[in-house]
Amino acid sequence: MTKKVLAVCSSILLFLMVSSGCWDSVELDRRAIISAAAIDLEDKTGRIKVTLHITRPNALARGTDGGGGQQEPVWVVSSAGYSLQDALKSLTTYTGRELFWGDNRILILGKKAAEKGIFPFIDFMIRDEGPRSRMLLLVTEGEAGKILTTRTEGKLERIVGIELERLVRNYTSASRSVLVDLHDVISKFSRGIISPVASRIELVESKMEGDGGEKGSQKEIRVDGAAVFKGDKLAGWLNAPETRGYLWITGDVGRGVILVKPPWKGGGTTPVNLNIRRASGIIKAKMKDGKPVIVIEVSEESELEVLPRGADLDRPGVIQSLERRQATVIKNEIKACLRKAQQEYKSDIFGFGEEVRRQFPAEWKKIEEEWGEIYPHLEVAVQVRAKIRGTGLLVNPVHPE
């Protein structure tokens, strides 16, 4: 991260602290109220394409659905330019209204735009008087605009920003994705060491079967996994288990299920479901022979709510065996994430460097310039303490044959 970028980020953070988020009293009917935005980079022209999901308050108030010649409650518009400002000016001319960002909840970036570098987009969104810093950041492997222009059956038909925000929060609470807003990204940029992550969003085909047995498919939006950045450029992706590994490390795991192989005789192949109740993660830095070492300490508590066939919790060592197995699952998810971030992407998304700087400022000054070379080979010790605190209402049930 260059000193110029750091200086800009610092000024942006100061701007966010003093800004109120309310700027004028332009009449509602003169505004194009944005609920979601998408940014892509065109292959052939290299232009920046912006797609906006605009809400029509009057149509929403009447509860219309677009039938009978009535207005649709939402309006999707796109424009391209050689800069983000040019594309947005074209949209303002096209809509005939001032773009209002105050209600925008979502910013989706296409893969090509994210690979080029997200800082110019984030910088504009934060500095402009309209956009709010708490809009969530998502990245898709395809075209971001398609997320907003594809109509999904029974979903996202009215205010897409609200629905997408709810979707992201649901997946994050289940520990399958991350919840990141523009303020989080700028904060990490300003520190200069830690690289950001973002939610991964996909438009997928899902199979369906009608009431009459007919088969077909429909478009479905899925928020699963995470996008990894190195600096401000997209480096790659984390799948769902790797993303939970990231959340274990950062202490942000919420709900979720850990699947383990049953330890009792005749348990078969059906896994045991352990529901996560509480979890915490701590990152510690140490010095070993003059070199930094990271220690990750994770504590987790789960509950066994439904007992599989043949379970015998009274047998000595069964609970302890389940605890060891779930600790192994947690450790494997953490190590999978570490391999991706350290060896493949070489991106410090965890803040290891920041922890070394905080704990050992004198030693950090000696290795700061070489951190990019040190990080991929950094020794990381993982310690997991997993406990089963409850077994629900069913204990040693009698399973009828």
Image (cartoon, rainbow, N blue to C red):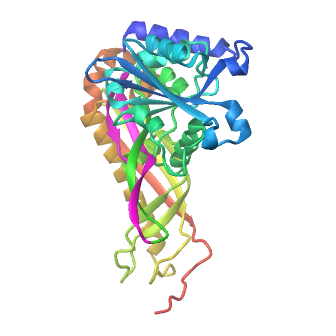
Q: Reply yes or no: does residue 226 show up in magenta.
A: yes
Q: Reply yes or no: does residue 370 show up in magenta.
A: no
Classify residue 287 by image quadrant.
top left
**Is 19 displayed left or right of 285 in the figure?**
right
> Residue 401: x percent and y percent?
46, 93
Position of the N terminus by quadrant: top left
- Identify the residue shown where x is 56% and y is 28%: 135
Q: Nearer the viewer, residue 364 or 69?
A: 69
- Identify the residue shown where x is 40% and y is 26%: 195
- Identify the residue shown where x is 26% and y is 31%: 376
Residue 287 visible in this rendered orientation of the protein: no
Q: Nearer the viewer, residue 325 or 286?
A: 325
Residue 392 visible in this rendered orientation of the protein: yes
**Is 25 displayed left or right of 97 in the figure?**
right
* 84 over 58 or under it: above or below: above
Classify residue 249 by image quadrant.
top left
* 101 over 74 or under it: above or below: above
| Magenta segment boundaries in residue numbering | 213-239
> Residue 32: x percent and y percent?
61, 22
> Residue 181: x percent and y percent?
53, 29
**Is 261 displayed left or right of 313 in the figure?**
left
Number of marks in the image?
0
**Is 81 displayed left or right of 95 in the figure?**
left
Helix, strand or loop for the magenta stretch, by majority: strand
Q: Residue furthest front?
A: 68
* 247 over 49 or under it: above or below: below
- Identify the residue shown where x is 27% and y is 24%: 43
> Residue 123: x percent and y percent?
48, 15
